[in-house]
Amino acid sequence: DAGVIQSPRHEVTEMGQEVTLRCKPISGHNSLFWYRQTMMRGLELLIYFNNNVPIDDSGMPEDRFSAKMPNASFSTLKIQPSEPRDSAVYFCASSPADSSAYNEQFFGPGTRLTVL
Amino acid sequence: RKEVEQDPGPFNVPEGATVAFNCTYSNSASQSFFWYRQDCRKEPKLLMSVYSSGNEDGRFTAQLNRASQYISLLIRDSKLSDSATYLCVASGRYGGSQGNLIFGKGTKLSVKP
């Protein structure tokens, strides 16, 4: 079975450019999570969706970040405009149940973003 | 105060050693606890859940102390392949919402021959 799929795996862009990260959760999973990981701050939850509906977006750092989940098999995280401090690894994860805290979260391989 | 705190390490141990990691969590309402493992430049993967009664999976033992808000992971007879970063995780940051997990920054383990 395919795990969580993320694209691109690596992205290098210049400050001010728009960046779009993509995620396909595991089929049948109804919770989806976007995380950001840096050495300084560790793994931080940005936003999570349950049945395609955003439940908690309080981790989104500012208005430059937005996330959508138009259907059960696809989600995007967009940064516009990007800044060097957005450089990090962005992980998408999915989980099979509504009360996701009680269930394993399966992580994708991540997108390594570098903003110059 | 960070919600989940861990000693970052690194822990450098010889093969066959027993090593213990600890972490503390700040949200007394957290109900679920886990240890995840993350290899260098890879994604985190679930190692084991942590139950109040304590639980064991082969060489790995996890313990939870709710009164002290303290979680531990013990690795016996460590192997080279155990080298990784171990992330302590607790649930439920917001009110009644148990849908999200809070990750510690991780403890790095390096097992040497």
Image (cartoon, coloured by chain):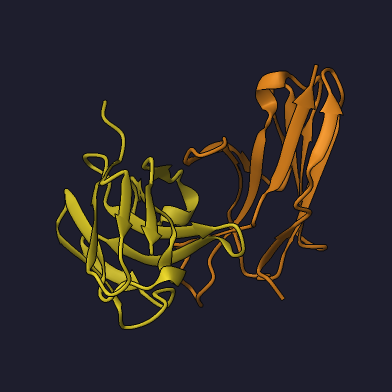
Chain colours: A yellow, B orange
Residue A17 visible: yes
Q: Is residue B4 left or right of residue A107?
A: right
The residue that appears at 65% across and 69% down in the rendered structure is B3
Up the image or down, B108 lies above or below A99; here it is above
Residue found farthest to the bottom? A63
Question: In percent of the image, x 39 and y 57: which residue is there?
Answer: A114
Q: Is residue A105 above or below residue A77?
A: above
Q: Position of residue A37 (x, y in %)?
A: 50, 57
Q: Position of residue A20 (x, y in %)?
A: 22, 61
User: Which of the two residues, A38 or B73, is positioned nearer the viewer here?
Assistant: A38
- Image quadrant where one finds the N terminus of chain B: bottom right
Decide: is B102 above or below A59: above
Q: Tell me where residue A93 appears, x and y as whole percent.
A: 37, 49
Which residue is at the front of the view, B27 or B104? B104
Residue in the foreground of this view, choosing between B89 and A16: A16
B89 displayed left or right of A50? right
- Residue B78, percent across and down? 78, 22
Residue at point 39% right, 74% down?
Answer: A60
Residue A87, image quadrant: bottom left
